[in-house]
Image: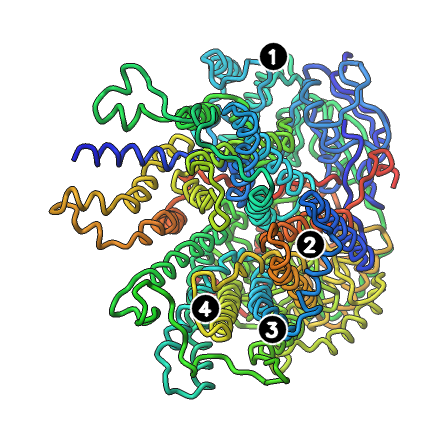
Amino acid sequence: MEYAIELKGISKSFGPVAANKNINLSLAKGEILALLGENGSGKTTLMNMLSGIYMPDSGSIFIDGKKVEINSPEDSGKLGIGMVHQHFKLVERFTALENIRIGIRGEGRFMHGPEVRKKIEDTAAKFGFDIDLDKKVANMAVSEKQTLEILKVLCYGAKIIILDEPTAVLTVQEIDKLFAVLRKMKEDGHSIIIITHKLNEVMAISDRVAVLRHGEYIGTVVTKETNEKALTELMVGRKITLNIDRPIIEKTHPLLEIRDLTVKSDEGATAIDHINFYIRGGEILGVAGIAGSGQKELCEAIAGLRPIVEGQMIHEGESIVGMSPKMILEHGISMSFIPEDRLGMGLAPSMSITDNMILKNYNESKGIFVDRKTAREEAQKVVDKLEIVTPSVDIPVRRLSGGNVQKVLLGREIKSGPNVLITAYPVRGLDINSSYTIYNILNDEKKKGVGILFVGEDLDVMLSLCDKIMVICHGKLQGVVNSDHTTKEEIGLMMTGTLNIVNKEGKTDGIARDSAITDEEGKA
Amino acid sequence: MLDVFTLFLFNIIVYNIPLLYGTTGEIMIEKSGSLNLGVEGTMAIGAVAGYLVGAKTDSLFVAVLVSFIASGLVGLLFSFLTVTLQANQNVTGLTITTFGVAFYYFIGNALSNSKGGWPKLSGTALDAQSQALHIPGLSDIPVVGKALFSHGILVYFGIIIAILMWLYFKKTVPGLKLRAIGENPAAADSLGVNVALYKYTHIIIGSGIMGIGGLYMGLNMGGTFEGSNCWINGYGWISIALVIFANWSPAKALLGTLVFGFFNTLRVQNAALAYVFPNTLGWLTKIPSHFFSALPFIITLLVLIISSMTSKDKSGEPQAIGRNYYREDR
Amino acid sequence: MRRYHLVRRADSQLKRTLIYYAIGILVSLTIGAVLLISLGINPFQYYGRMFTIGLVGNKYGYKSIEGLLKVFVPLLITSLALSLSFKMRFWNIGGEGEFLIGAICASIVAFNSSGMPNFVTVVLMCLAAMISSGIIGVAIAALKVRFNTNETLMTLMLNYIMLYVIRYIGDTKADWNFFLREDSERPIFGSFPESAVMGGIPLGKFKLLWAVLIAILLTAVIYIYLKYTKQGYEISVVGDSSATAKYAGMNVGKIVLRTMFISSALIGLAAALAVSSAGTISDTITNDVGWTGIIVAWLSKLSVPAVFVTAILISVLQYGCQAAATQYPAIDVNFADLLQGIILFSVLVADFAANFRIVRKEDAKHA
């Protein structure tokens, strides 16, 4: 077989965390290869090394059989590689034509010779794109923007095209259209890598499937010779027994009940779609789902940072809908969300650990002054208890390592003594030891009777740590499972939208038997 | 009667062309995503350097070239500090103004107190070369000939720069790339555009253009150095305002220069107009000249507020203006 | 392709920063010295005269100190006020305009105060100035909060609009215009009645104006305000990350409005103290503190003690140039501005050198 791309022994680490370990992957000419893996399995990192954003620590890349070095997006483009990023890189104020024109090489210094336009139009027609070249990006729908991104790389003469989760933002009809385009591209001799989590799509579009797990290459299978169940197994792996404690505590009444919650994303799409669930005191409820399934919006809605479209959020019998973040905080609901950039929300990076400790309760002390004496003592306590490595509590958090930053954030949330703790990706980017410290912290809170919502990424961890796991897919509830009575495969199938057990056995998941909300209230 | 009117039109152009240089220069810089508040200082340095070397060599061409280079060097300083060293653009720009104007006075005082004294303009070839050109045919048309076609070469040069820049942004690929950087540097970067190189080049060229405007002001003032009054006299600041009024378009800058110039000329000539047209324009003398001076700033303030209240769609303000770009190497 | 790249130093040591700054200032003074030599002036003599602000061998030395303090007080307060808004990442470059509004409103009180007690008049002047400047500041902040109007450009326009307002007042002879001297044919700003002129503590011939004490007290208050109060804490959080401030339940809009009121009102206060100390108003009353204050605040990295020290140094530079100009007619006060500019450029470079390192790509990979 002739290969468009061969990767041999590629490794890449960010600090102590290995994102890719000794990866071998090949893309045959004229095939569509699906790249499958859970969040954090290293797919995007691997592809970014092909698009010139990162450079591998070791290993080699072969394009059309020749060994190459890719140092910049420019190098990548010259080798005929085009990547459609998950987050579009478009100039909003420009028209489609102008956006494409920025990257076209040759063709002189003047803008739209009719032949440039003709060329683009020809390319669009060839692959069946329906696009208005004079429309401004700002006025485009998401699917149009994506079409533009794909057309862009085609116009630059890319022979190898990488699409990072292209279907995440599309409707079913739009996905069909996209697939038709991909097939045309394939017929035309293009080689395509598509990253997606949705197994039905993998089955529908790909020739072969390569699977990554925890940064390692698991293997490649021919799509025709496999099925969704087998792929799920490859993706999530056999259950690994982790040494995480799961103390069994007597669970109390539902502390937080969510009914029929609908929330919109920043872009105006429905991010959370009529979700029901509840958290009891003394339990950890995991939230599993592919990245971008509405986790962020869910957390923000509960914390009062994002207005909800409809639904109810009842905390100990009282509605928290419409309350300010501050009031919700005073109610005892505490949220720590670790965003991708870690320092974006929740911490003031240039300020000291002490100052970050009091971010939410600086106003509680009497008088006009901030009570730093108590704050410093509390900060020291948190530092000691969570074993935060720092020369002193007066160091700006920006200078701490990732794990310690997360401990500061979590330490503050716990310190206020919440009875509901919402935590998202608390071990993101951490090494094993730091992760275990975090798990222990959460378990200690659970023992105190706190109800914890744990938005996680690693299914093994969630199965070991959480009492129950609710699975969401594209903002819809797929069901709530008991960690002791489920398998990774089952959760995997639910995450990818293949399995939905919400109304299994006539009982609706997500509504407590001893709910504080009556049926009438629930409907209101 | 007609003379007053003609003179009025003539003056709008003669006295306000420096605004066009300042504005087009600043537009070029702002289109690259940088806000340079150093226009006043950049113009002052270009003016003094261009004038002195021009007087020495007695050549307008050399004067223009030197003012372009001197101000271009100031642009290089601004680029180095803000693009490479990531320094704050506001502070750097304001300091360039403080520095540039002080430099102007420093050189001026030093020369005036020296043996040779400050070089004079009158009677030199430099003066002759910057005087009004007589364009056969066009200059002789009544009214229009005097108002539009009896200017020095730098007037036409300024207009040509504005038109060329307009075409550059609108019709060329480098212009497109430049605008892309001002809007979304990360997107331009991902398409292989060398962001730093583009910023440097355009900041330097934009600053150079401002310098020629400064030189024009010096020549227009008869080349005399006054210890208390800088040639640039606030035109750099008005240029910054004009950029907003012109909605970041060199073509509209041409129009804006005429509008701001109209008020500016009204300030100087209101008495003459009122004298000639006592019945219709007599009220002009009642309006204090300060009002006309402040008008560009008042109009710009209103434009700023109103345009921020309404949809941003039509605004030409580069989205990434004022923010430094730093592709984080991970 | 790029062999080298920049890495932010993980630790920023105060000592290293100070050393780099000192080098930067030294380089600037050397450049200044070269300029002086080119004029045939001995730089040591000139700098000597400048840094002693004409005190040496001057029997009216106390006048020099008084003069220096008149430059220092408005500059100090304005720089502190600007630091307050810059800390919040609000680009208030309207110091000149806000100062002028304050000066005009304080003068309205002053010119109409004959017969009133001195203390009451000065307090009223301060209040008038603070409220008028503060309101303008709030209006600009409100537009920023509500419509995200560009505050840098708005405040810039304000400076020039106010400049022409005061010039109009100063140039217009009219019945209503109590700002001007009645006994003069030409328009000249009048002097304040005794009641509006700032008093002080006489120390021999030298008079220590109350304004100086107020300024020093204010420095302490602002230091405490920023470092120890809840409001100061809020400013830091909003400036560091407004997303975090919202997450913590802070009302970011309110904090921006409040801080801009305080910032502008303080500039108004500086203006009231300046006109009262001068006993009159003029269109050059700001002495460019709105601009210089930005440089002072930035050189000091918005730290209050550093602003205090930097304001003294810049005042010495400015006033020293004035003092030296009597002996060196070839150099006027603009030399101070020139040096100030060079110092800021050098310090920007020094700051960068103190915070970044240049690393070879290969080394970075294995680091």
| Cα gap from disc 2 to disc 1, whole angstroms | 45 Å
Element type at marker 1? loop
Q: Position of residue C225 (x, y in %)?
A: 62, 74
Please say whether residue C145 is visible from this viewpoint: yes
Residue under the image location 42 percent in, 62 percent down: C139
- Does residue A366 sit above or below B166 in this rendering? below
Name the mark nearer the viewer: 2 or 3: 3
Per the rendering, the mark at residue C63 is 3
Quadrant containing the C terminus of chain B is top right
Q: Chain of mark 2?
A: A
- Does residue B283 sit above or below A132 in this rendering? below
- Does residue C231 sit above or below A154 in this rendering? below
| Cα gap from disc 3 to disc 4, whole angstroms | 33 Å
Three-letter amino acid code at the position of disc 2: Leu
Give the residue pinned by disc 1: A188
Are labels 4 and 1 on one chain? no
Q: Position of residue B283 (x, y in %)?
A: 18, 51
- Disc on the earlier residue, 2 or 1: 1
| Cα gap from disc 2 to disc 3, whole angstroms | 54 Å
Per the rendering, the mark at residue C134 is 4
Give the residue pinned by disc 2: A343
Q: Position of residue B236 (x, y in %)?
A: 47, 43
Three-letter amino acid code at the position of disc 4: Gly
Give the camera-side residue of C135 and A284: C135
